[in-house]
Amino acid sequence: MRSPILPAAVLVAALATTAAANMGGSPPPEPTAPPQGEIRPTEKLTSRQQAEQLYGGAYEDVAKANKDLAGGKEKNAQKKLKHALERAADAVALDSTYHEAWNLVGYASRKLGDYPRSLAAYDRCLRIKPDYAPAREYLGEALVELGRVREAREQLAWLQRLNAADQATALAARIDAWQAAHPDSVLPAAQDGKPAPAATPDTSAKAPGSGN
């Protein structure tokens, strides 16, 4: 991204750091650092540059949503997540190879309860970059929320092969928590992207990207 985005990136980093401190997780990857030089008003942004601008805005929306969730402002958080989803969707429309933006589409959709869209977005992300650990973790978490623990373990195995220790630890903890809540049974895979009856989706906030 170009230098006009730098102030937003700085603000985003500050918001994400605050959210991470509140929620005990790590912030998502920051938007790509702008290269040296400035874009003159008459210069036209490429599709990728426009997508990166949108991703930066979506990143900021998620950080604000997490801050709202930490303060118990659920409705405000939902509005910001919807805005983040719109921006991330516009980003991948501009550049369908932007795997970080697909990951954010998956994250925001999952937090809004749209599991079919979330799973599809994670799949697109991982088709582009199979070794992208954040998406592997979040896909695993979505599968746990749907009661599809065996499939979640497949994502955990991926993370272990990638030596993504932080993501593997976070997903393993989520799997262990689900199993502790369901000691006598293993739920069948959910159908049509809907949570299995006894599985309760986790609503804790965690920004998309590396770490928790």
Image (cartoon, helix red, strand yellow):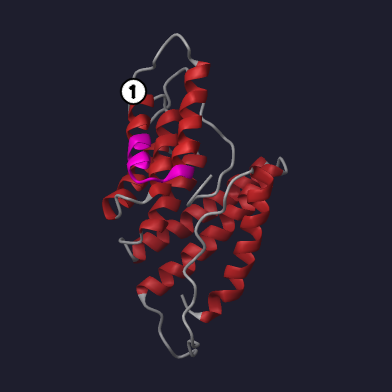
Give, as a single range, the part of the protein colored magenta. Answer: 155-166
Q: Is residue 21 above or below residue 15?
A: above
Q: Is residue 120 above or below residue 18?
A: above
Visible residue check, residue 126: yes
Queried whether the magenta region covers residue 110, the answer comes back as no
The structure residue drawn at horizontal position 69% and vertical position 46%, both measured from the top left corner, is: 22
Residue 35: % across, % down = 46, 80
Visible residue check, residue 113: no
Q: Quadrant of residue 156?
A: top left
Q: Is residue 129 above or below residue 172?
A: below
The structure residue drawn at horizontal position 57% and vertical position 35%, both measured from the top left corner, is: 203
Residue 88: % across, % down = 44, 58
Residue 58: % across, % down = 52, 59
Residue designated by label 1 = 189
In this rendered view, identify the residue nearer to me: 93 or 185: 185
Amino acid at the residue labelled 1: Ala
Q: Quadrant of residue 139?
A: top left
The structure residue drawn at horizontal position 30% and vertical position 54%, both measured from the top left corner, is: 129
Label 1: few (<14), some or many (≥20) within 10 Å? some
Mostly what secondary structure, the magenta segment?
helix
Residue 192: % across, % down = 33, 29
Q: Is residue 49 above or below residue 187?
A: below
Residue 138 lies left or right of residue 11; in this view the side is: left
Question: How many labels were placed on the picture?
Answer: 1
The structure residue drawn at horizontal position 61% and vertical position 69%, both measured from the top left corner, is: 10
Queried whether the magenta region covers residue 160, the answer comes back as yes
